[in-house]
Image (cartoon, grey):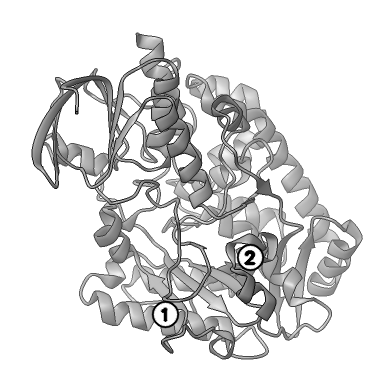
Amino acid sequence: MLRSRYDAVIAGGGHNGLVAAAYLARAGRRVLVLERLDHVGGLAVSARAFPGVDARLSRYSYLVSLLPAKVVEDLGLPLELRRRRYASYTPVGESGLLVDNGDDDRTAASFERVTGGGADLGAWRRFYAMTAEVAAKVAPTLVEPLPGRTAMRDLVGPEAWRELFERPIGEVVDERFADDTVRGVVLTDALIGTFADPCDESLLANRCFLYHVIGDGTGDWNVPVGGMGAVSGGLAEIARAAGAEILTGAEVLAVDPSGEVVFRDAAGEHTVTGERVLANVPPAVLARLLGSPESGEPAPEGAQLKVNMVLSRLPRLRDGSVDPAAAFSGTFHINESRDQLARAYAEAARGRIPSLPPAEVYCHSLTDPSILGPGLRAAGAQTMTLFGLHMPARLFRDDPVASREEALRATLASMNAVLAEPIEDCLLRAPDGSVCLEARTPVDLENEAGLPGGHIFHRDLSWPFGEAGSWGVETGHERILLCGAGARRGGGVSGIPGHNAAMAVLEGS
């Protein structure tokens, strides 16, 4: 039986909402989580995407970097994260740039071969030493009340503040690095899920870059053992064990500033009241639920093509000196040089699907074979995740199906241009004969997951500083808080907005 009143009603059962529910329920609060879909987890889920194929794919979100160890330890989340031995591999002609976390000499030799000298390697080491220092300083503040701008500037120091917070990241990269390939590898972290010119004065690309390098104080992008579903599934179990009520198939229809929430499930419409309402939904959705759809912000626009595949085997590389297992266990960059990124952005900005789409792939199963059934493991099968850049939602509005197919064809052709054989020759077929490949555009995410514009961060990322002393989750209504990716310091699989919303509730009790 539902109560009529709760200490907290959480709209949305994604991983951030589950983090908030777990913290609040463990603190003795009465908590209700309402999730529209028939499962919790939002985009942090694992699924068997292809009929009869025993592979649990991280279908949407796929790596973990920002999840604080504090949240894992506070909640006792049974999660294993594995560091990837290889950071990245970037094909360049018949060779390639390999960044090996376990072998500095091999990385140096690869830089020498691709760039023709050691200057960019030295610049690389100096630049990432700076970002590592920023990560160590900034990451702990993400689960504390917001620092102000001056406090953040003093914390990171003058050089990092100038290079990462004040100057366009594209200009910084162009100054620090000479090689086009190296520049592109650095800049991709500024463009994940973000449609931006890295030289634009808005510094949107800087904000994206910052979140991709600070991580949990290291900037490492780690593989969750068991897939992304291990994150959300573990959080749901903890929240339920602490007494939180979690309803799936429960769509929130309206939220009132008084704390009243109307939702619908299979039994009809219901109304409950929360002392606080935590909105684990995009700000544009919250505005609609509050009856004020004009949020005053630009409409969110996602900018990615996500392709999930199961391979019968890894494809061959043109570079015979690198094992495909090494190249694909890190981030495998596809036509992401500085110039290629700029051309693709310019084409997309003109309303055209890029002729040579930049993308990156990696194989989760190389680091965590447990996501494959025994038969697939024995046969040498692997999962492959592709994330395509500069694919804004505007490209898919007029004809979502045809434009998705066009973008997929162009992206696979882009990938094949850097391989020794077509990726299509390596795709596994399901028992029914279908190819194990699925593609999702921003418009697909909008329709399937309810993300306005298919924006994976709910809206453009914000700086990790602001009104000093606040938690970055506050809205214009005292009883309503944001606890999703659209909160300040949100974005990615982090649990940070969920933690911060819970702390705001407990602090205000």
Give neighbour class at mark 2: few <14, some 14-19, many 20+ (Cα, 10 Å). Answer: many
Horizontal and vertical percent position of residue 427: 54, 84
The quarter in which the C terminus is drawn is top left
Q: Is 280 situated above or below 228?
A: above
Q: Is residue 387 left or right of residue 96?
A: left
Name which quarter of the figure residue 335 lies in.
Answer: bottom right
In this view of the protein, which residue sits in the foreground, 252 or 40?
40
Query: How far separated are the C-alphas under marks 2 and 1?
Result: 23 Å
Q: Residue at x 57, y 71 (%)?
A: 384
Horizontal and vertical percent position of residue 45: 44, 53
Q: Is residue 467 something one can see in this rendering?
A: no
Name which quarter of the figure residue 305 lies in.
Answer: bottom left
Q: Is 393 situated above or below 234?
A: below
Q: Hey, what amino acid is under mark 2?
A: Ser
* Residue placed under numbered mark 1 in the picture: 408
Among all residues in the image, which is located at the extreme front?
1
Q: Hey, what amino acid is under mark 1?
A: Leu
Name which quarter of the figure residue 177 lies in.
Answer: bottom right
At mark 2, the secondary structure is: helix
Q: Residue at x 43, y 16 (%)?
A: 27
- Residue 365 circle label: 2
In this view of the protein, which residue sits in the foreground, 269 or 398?
269
Q: Is residue 319 left or right of residue 173?
A: right
